[in-house]
Amino acid sequence: MAVYTEVSDEALCAFLADYPLGELRAFRGIAEGVENSNYALKTTEGDYILTLYEKRVDPTELPWFLGLMQHLVARGLSAPMPVAGRDGVALRELAGRPAAICTFLPGVWPRRVRPEHCGPLGAALAELHLAGTDYTAVRPNGLGVASWAPLLERCRADGESVQAGLIAELDAELAGILAGWPKAGTLPSGQIHADLFPDNVFFLEDGGAPRVSGLIDFYFACTDLLAYDVAVCLNAWCFEPDRSFNVTKARSLLREYSARRPLSAEERAALPALCRGAALRFLLTRLYDWVNTPKGAMVTRKDPLEYLYKLRFFAQATGPESIGA
Amino acid sequence: MAVYTEVSDEALCAFLADYPLGELRAFRGIAEGVENSNYALKTTEGDYILTLYEKRVDPTELPWFLGLMQHLVARGLSAPMPVAGRDGVALRELAGRPAAICTFLPGVWPRRVRPEHCGPLGAALAELHLAGTDYTAVRPNGLGVASWAPLLERCRADGESVQAGLIAELDAELAGILAGWPKAGTLPSGQIHADLFPDNVFFLEDGGAPRVSGLIDFYFACTDLLAYDVAVCLNAWCFEPDRSFNVTKARSLLREYSARRPLSAEERAALPALCRGAALRFLLTRLYDWVNTPKGAMVTRKDPLEYLYKLRFFAQATGPESIGA
């Protein structure tokens, strides 16, 4: 849940005076997004989202994130556009936090993913990767493959309390993932979203098939293997609530992705290993949060074991065909 | 925090098909309001709020609440207007919960109350009371004076853990309040909001003095003494963060209220006792929630002791003048 930082009306009015956005009409906290405080902001000029960046986001990285969003919007992607103040600066400060106003995107994120969502998702992911190619500033992936061994170490003491034998299983999985990971330079890299879960993708239907109306929450974006972003989406979009892998969803996602940015033979071959790595990444961060979230904290802890089943599924994949590639 | 019930996109689309509201454009959970799940809903027709009524609201009472809101809006008050479906019915069902769509109200609730808010608040409260006079259906106040003794009993076992001596002090306060409470029939009663805290009142400033743009959250509304609603507002709006009572705020509130609905001599004389009762009411419900909220629950517990200081202040009031009346 969100809204950690309360903003006084005086502070808000003073903040808005630095923007060419007209008069304030409404200001409501949004219950979505767990990392930052988000407010729906309505002015006489239109609808916006005001974000206050909380402690999980490193303020020195915000120019990279906001620059990426501006770049992607300029290339035609439907992403939140950071709005510059009258002095041309988009990253500002409010209530003692770094803060930015972005354009509001229409759409609804799918609470239950249907196969019809996965094709448009794959297309949007490819368009994101293509639009990012000429954003040249590099941001290493702080939650990439090199981070998983130290992250597992930090879960070692308490992880067994979540499930007996879990840490030994993750040690073995991590060894397998590292052994099968693509060698540096063999796969194309670029700007990836790295967290493109269903609640970060808005759709509109208008009586027909769903179409993507916006991608949001670029605060895990980084420079890493493009096919790893596809692997994150296969984890996040293609499992059913009963833990089964829906290969129809995966095929739709991959078909529409490849129609815009064809996967090379090397990327396709690496996809099961990348999926296994992505499953471990989300398992580890959820496990870390699970064992380190104080009881009573106002945060929803996500079940790490959901990703244990995904990890096992991808570990057993016999080749790209078995995951729809 | 809010949003307890998730709504699937299919269920939402089916639900909206029963309304003449055009196509869905956006749907975002709102982080405000603790009793129900609220969503900001945007359609091609405009902005709305979708509310799913959670377990604290008795479904059999919803027609009374929605009927009151419709009545008040028809009398010109700026309150959420329940929108009827194509069949003329406003109270419907979604995701297994009673649900209604209401019009969206512009404005921002004051995070920090200034004296300039209190006059417009008093005026709006009087207008609410006047607009409610010909809504004749009665809803007894379930958290009125008769409920306080049983509520205190339910806090007796655990209340001492919050502060030593608290229960004995509340026993004495309750006895004093009951002894000084206005006799039935001596003060005018009618439809009251009963929970008109700052987060339920929206203001717009537009460069000038704040004006009330909307009153929301009528789900504690009931039929009780009109002056008791004034007493609730004196509790909720006229204390500073340092616990001092700001008599300038109280005078503004009462002056603008009385300009629209003059307080009788009996109401004015009863105001200190009503304020003391209102302080006890919020203290008791907060205390009950405090000792009965499981650790780790996703609910913000409000500090009951804030109201102990208000209770003591009103208990020592020497007359209506000392509270600005």
Image (tube, coloured by chain):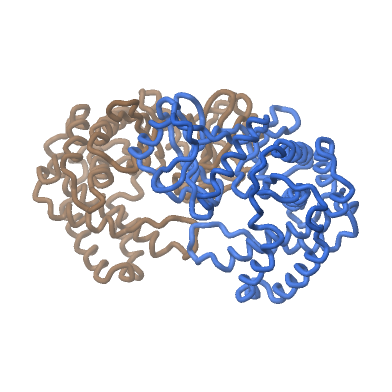
Chain colours: A blue, B brown
**Image mark count:** 0
Q: Nearer the viewer, residue A212 or A192?
A: A192
Taking the image as shown, residue B150 lies to the left or right of residue A112, namely left
Q: Is residue B115 left or right of residue B141?
A: left
x and y percent of residue A198 in the render? 67, 45
Which residue is depicted at the point 64% across and 66% down?
Answer: A151
Q: Position of residue A314 (x, y in %)?
A: 81, 59
Residue A19 lies, with reference to residue A292, above or below; the image says: above
Percent across and percent down for residue A277 are 75, 59
Q: Nearer the viewer, residue A243 or B187?
A: A243
Residue A47 vertical placement versus A58 (above, below):
above
Q: Is residue B122 visible?
A: yes
Q: Is residue B299 left or right of residue A76?
A: left
Front in this rendered view, residue A68 or A193: A68
Identify the residue at image location x=33%, y=30%. Answer: B212
- Residue A97: percent from the left, percent from the top? 43, 48
Q: What's the residue at 60%, 65% (across, down)?
A: A288
